[in-house]
């Protein structure tokens, strides 16, 4: 128990250090009274220049995807910025927009021309993602500009934003500049979080370097840019970090304000925080260069801030599990720790059932953020972000990621239990199959698994053989029919009781199948079915096929095209039930109970 308490104490110190000592210190430092903003002339006088420094040429880069709701406000905001028009150019790329974004930009081009500001708009038909378009626009803009600013379409900038940014770059050591981030509409938790973040960034800047930027607005020296890897998730972090890598500083200018106009609902916020969590893990891996040299104090700031924040969901989970383990061994202190943690997490859940207070709303925001971050990092480790971040929603956007995580956990748990409980039956079933007809007791067949935007997964399903050996050697892939002569005597019993499906527990544990899901189909039939039945393949979009499923318990095996047509509706209905954990639990319980009933009554086919 000494070792366990040592680890528990270390985790306690890390949690207190990150949340209380480091964060408290940074917020206190960030709240110190800032100096008044300087004008370019005053700043130049402070630097003892003989003549005012000429303002640098700035390019404003903005990828856009279906932004018709915000683009006019953004373009109007740009025209109101206090900066010489001949020194400003705007570069926008419509990344596969399917709305009126490109046409709105074209209608504004005469106003930009009249104001003397260059407006370049590239209307690309295909959606390649934000990172690809940033690389494309940055390569074009860096040929003409000294400084490149990046800004979200949905964020408005303070009128003097470019002037203030230019002042920051009078310091030759400044490689990138970021700003204050404000929300037009925010919950109390969001508001508190971003107040703290702005204070922390101000403190980081005073101590040497801000860790990353803010997608609403940040600026960097054009010469420091190099193309981002295609799978980059948080571009607004990685681009400023290029400046640190090359020996420059990233500074925070508190007099530049960016205001996010578009409020996000709970689900959008949850998805965004998953992306940020995945990006944090990616940047922790890719920014190891920070630890090789001091980089103006960046090593301590990165480790204490971004580093521990990224690892904190894992630390909190380990802390809870270790507390429970020590409490089970009889420690009252550990039992108290478990009680405190449980109380905190329960309070954080209260807003989900409509109970709102200032404390519970803030706890919900922060604990929910860690939960979303943990899920995002697990998705990243599973390879789901290998194409980076794209504006287009994935095929599985209607499925709750938390539900899919719980579903996989239940597959592993129940699949293991099912395999252990039924394993004694396997030798008996195998012997009966061999006595009834020659050939192997097991049957392997290639099936179509989960379908994603990038690939179609194929796997070999394992079943007990119910047909005569090499039953489809002459006919090829065909559906089984009623009273099919290819089905053996023991095979009819196995099909009626669904015992032929038992070996598929192996497929479940391997991650190729789920306990519950759409029926896996053979590849040679899928093409014909997709041509004959619209949305057939979407039935397994982001979803693994199952041993049993809603369609199977309500209809049975497929005998013809009409059977498949009827099953599509059942399959899509099941997929929609994955939109929330509660709906999924109800649906899976119904399917499991009905499956047991069918097996007991020998209603299978």
Image: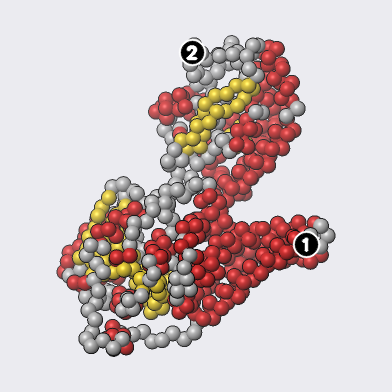
Tell me if residue 274 comes above or below residue 513 in the rendering.
below
Disc 2 to disc 1, C-alpha distance: 68 Å
Residue 287 x/y as whole percent: 46, 61
- The answer, for residue 571, to whether it is visible in the render is yes
Asked if 473 appears above or below 367 in the picture, the reply is: above
Compared across the picture, whether 391 is left or right of 574 comes to left
Q: Residue at x 23, y 84 (%)?
A: 52
Residue name at image x 24 percent, y 81 percent: 53
> Which quarter of the rendered picture does the C terminus lie within?
top right
In the image as oriented, which residue stretches furthest toward the right? 330
Residue 135 falls left or right of residue 375:
left
Query: To which quarter of the image does residue 247 belong?
Result: bottom left
| Marker count (numbered) | 2
* Quadrant (top left/top right/bottom left/bottom right) for the N terminus: bottom right
Q: Position of residue 40 (x, y in %)?
A: 28, 83
Q: Along the polypeptide, which appears first: circle 2 or circle 1?
A: 1
The residue carrying mark 1 is 2
Residue at image x 65%, y 28%?
Answer: 503
Q: Which percent across, then down, holds residue 153?
A: 34, 63
Classify mark 1: residues with Cα within 10 Å, few (<14), some (14-19) or many (20+).
few
The quadrant holding residue 12 is: bottom right
Rendering coords of residue 338 (x, y %): 74, 62
Q: In what element is the residue under mark 1? A: helix
Q: From this view, report whether residue 169 is shown above or below residue 104.
A: below
State if disc 1 and disc 2 touch (CB < 8 Å).
no
Residue behind mark 2 = 475
């Amino acid at each position: 128990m000494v070792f366990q308490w040592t680890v528990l104490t270390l985790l306690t110190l890390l949690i207190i250090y990150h949340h209380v000592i480091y964060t408290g210190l940074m917020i206190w430092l960030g709240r110190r009274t800032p100096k008044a903003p300087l004008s370019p002339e005053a700043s130049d006088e402070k630097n003892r220049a003989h003549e005012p420094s000429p303002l640098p040429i700035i390019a404003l880069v903005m990828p856009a995807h279906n932004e018709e709701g915000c683009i006019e406000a953004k373009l109007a905001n740009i025209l109101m910025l206090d900066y010489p028009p001949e020194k400003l150019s705007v570069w926008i790329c419509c990344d596969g927009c399917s709305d009126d974004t490109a046409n709105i930009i074209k209608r504004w081009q005469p106003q930009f021309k009249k104001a003397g500001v260059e407006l370049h708009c590239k209307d690309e038909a295909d959606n390649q993602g934000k990172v690809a378009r940033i690389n494309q626009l940055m390569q074009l803009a860096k040929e003409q500009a000294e400084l490149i600013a990046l800004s979200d379409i949905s964020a408005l900038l303070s009128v003097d934003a470019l002037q203030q940014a230019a002042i920051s770059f009078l310091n030759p050591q400044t490689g990138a500049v970021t700003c204050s981030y404000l929300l037009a509409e925010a919950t109390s938790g969001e508001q508190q979080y971003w107040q703290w973040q702005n204070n922390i960034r101000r403190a980081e800047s005073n101590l040497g370097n801000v860790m990353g930027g803010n997608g609403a607005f940040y600026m960097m020296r054009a010469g420091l840019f190099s193309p981002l890897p295609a799978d980059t998730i948080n571009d607004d972090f990685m681009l400023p970090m290029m400046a640190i890598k090359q020996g420059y500083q990233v500074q925070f200018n508190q007099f530049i304000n960016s205001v996010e106009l578009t409020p996000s609902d709970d689900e959008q916020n949850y998805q965004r925080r998953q992306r940020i969590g995945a990006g944090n893990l990616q940047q922790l891996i890719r920014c190891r260069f920070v630890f090789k040299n001091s980089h103006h104090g960046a090593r301590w700031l990165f480790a204490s801030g971004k580093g521990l924040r990224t690892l904190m969901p894992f630390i909190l989970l380990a802390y809870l599990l270790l507390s429970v383990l020590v409490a089970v061994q009889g420690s009252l202190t550990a039992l108290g720790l478990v009680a405190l943690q449980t109380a905190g997490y329960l309070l954080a859940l209260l807003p989900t059932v409509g109970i709102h207070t200032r404390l519970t709303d803030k706890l919900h925001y922060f604990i929910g953020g860690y939960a979303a971050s943990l899920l995002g990092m697990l998705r990243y480790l599973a390879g789901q972000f290998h194409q980076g971040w794209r504006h287009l929603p994935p095929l599985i956007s209607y499925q709750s990621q938390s539900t899919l995580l719980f579903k996989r956990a239940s597959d592993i748990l129940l699949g293991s239990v099912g395999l252990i409980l039924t394993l004694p039956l396997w030798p008996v079933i195998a012997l009966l199959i061999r006595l009834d007809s020659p050939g192997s007791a097991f049957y392997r067949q290639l099936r179509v698994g989960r379908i994603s935007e990038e690939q179609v997964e194929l796997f070999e399903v394992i079943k007990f053989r119910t047909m005569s050996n090499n039953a489809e050697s002459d006919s090829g892939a065909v559906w089984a029919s009623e009273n099919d002569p290819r089905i053996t005597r023991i095979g009819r019993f196995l099909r009626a009781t669904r015992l032929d499906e038992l070996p598929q527990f192996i497929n479940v544990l391997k991650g190729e199948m789920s306990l519950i899901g759409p029926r896996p189909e053979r590849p040679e039939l899928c093409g014909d079915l997709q041509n004959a039945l619209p949305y057939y393949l979407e039935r397994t979009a982001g979803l693994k096929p199952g041993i049993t499923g809603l369609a199977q318990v309500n209809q049975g095996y497929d005998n013809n095209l009409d059977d498949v047509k009827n099953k599509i509706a059942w399959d899509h209905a099941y997929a929609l039930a994955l939109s929330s954990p509660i709906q999924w639990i109800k649906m899976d319980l119904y399917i499991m109970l009905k499956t047991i009933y069918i097996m007991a009554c020998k209603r299978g086919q």
